[in-house]
Image (spheres, rainbow, N blue to C red):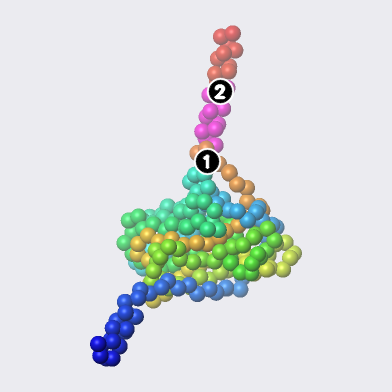
Amino acid sequence: MSRFVFGLSIVAACLAVPAQAQVTYATDGTTAIIPGLTGFATTGADMTGLNVTATFSNGFSQSLAWGTTGVGAGGVFGTGWSLTLSGDSFAGNWLFDFTTIEAQLTRLVLDGSTGLTVLDRTLPSPGTDGSANGTDFSFAGGTCGSCVATATYGGLTSIGLAAAVGDLFQKVTVDFTGGTGPRTDWSFVQDTDNDSRFVPGIPEPETYALLLGGLGLVSWVAKRRRRVA
């Protein structure tokens, strides 16, 4: 094989290597103060009220509040898309599904300030007392192989009067650049904690209705039994 042909084969091999997903990190300078944390373990069921905004290349944008869907699980279900998480957010994959929408995702925002959810970054480690280790936003499992994004964290968070350590934030905005946003299902990792004001396990309104209905039925049965007696 000539040197020229060998050189061409090397170039071709390099061009054949698929692009790798890339994330650049930034902060926006805003700050926030919370009274404390509930603990370092947070599941998809513990992020009620987290605001999720998805923006697409066709101009469509939708914001939804996170809700609990089952034991350790939660999510949002939009028009043609959904975002869900089952299990601990430290290592569990957030799953973004394109259910019917045919457009490219250009921006994804996770805003915990409305739902008392705090985003816990990788560094510094171990970080704020009570938060343990965290994980930055990152693409998971090669599902967004050529995506290039900037993850901007906002609302640097401190506990009470203590100075912010630099690992806790209220919000992350993920902007996909150069037309590299996903068009098909993909997943990512982002650790979360909970503000100590968060009260887990608050039933949905439908649950209250069922509970009141059941109590009413029990009361009616009890009265009927007393009358028969």
Please state, as top left, top right, bottom left or bottom right, where the C terminus lies in the image. top right
Residue pointed to by mark 2: 218
> In the rendered image of this protein, does residue 156 appear above or below residue 118?
below
Of residues 44 and 110, the one nearer the viewer is: 44
Q: Residue extending furthest bottom?
A: 3
Q: Which image quarter: residue 131? A: bottom right
Observer able to see residue 49: no
Q: Is residue 214 magenta?
A: yes
The image shows residue 12 at horizontal and vertical percentages of 29, 81
What is the three-letter code of the residue carrying label 2? Val
Q: Residue at x 67, y 63 (%)?
A: 128
> In the rendered image of this protein, does residue 216 appear above or below residue 75?
above
> How many C-alpha atoms fall within 10 Å of the one at disc 1: few (<14), some, or many (≥20)?
few
Badge 2 marks a residue whose secondary structure is helix
Principal secondary structure, stretch drawn in magenta: helix
Residue pointed to by mark 1: 205
Q: Which residues are magenta?
A: 208-219
Q: Which image quarter: residue 112? A: bottom right
In screen coordinates, is 157 left or right of 209? right
Badge 1 marks a residue whose secondary structure is helix
Q: Residue at x 53, y 47 (%)?
A: 72
Q: Earlier in the sequence, mark 2 or mark 1?
A: 1
Q: Is residue 158 magenta?
A: no
Total labels: the figure holds 2
Q: Residue extending furthest right?
A: 161
The image shows residue 139 at horizontal and vertical percentages of 45, 66
Q: Residue at x 50, y 56 (%)?
A: 92
The image shows residue 130 at horizontal and vertical percentages of 68, 58
The image shows residue 210 at horizontal and vertical percentages of 51, 33
Please state, as top left, top right, bottom left or bottom right, where the N terminus lies in the image. bottom left
Q: Residue at x 64, y 67 (%)?
A: 125
Observer able to see residue 123: yes
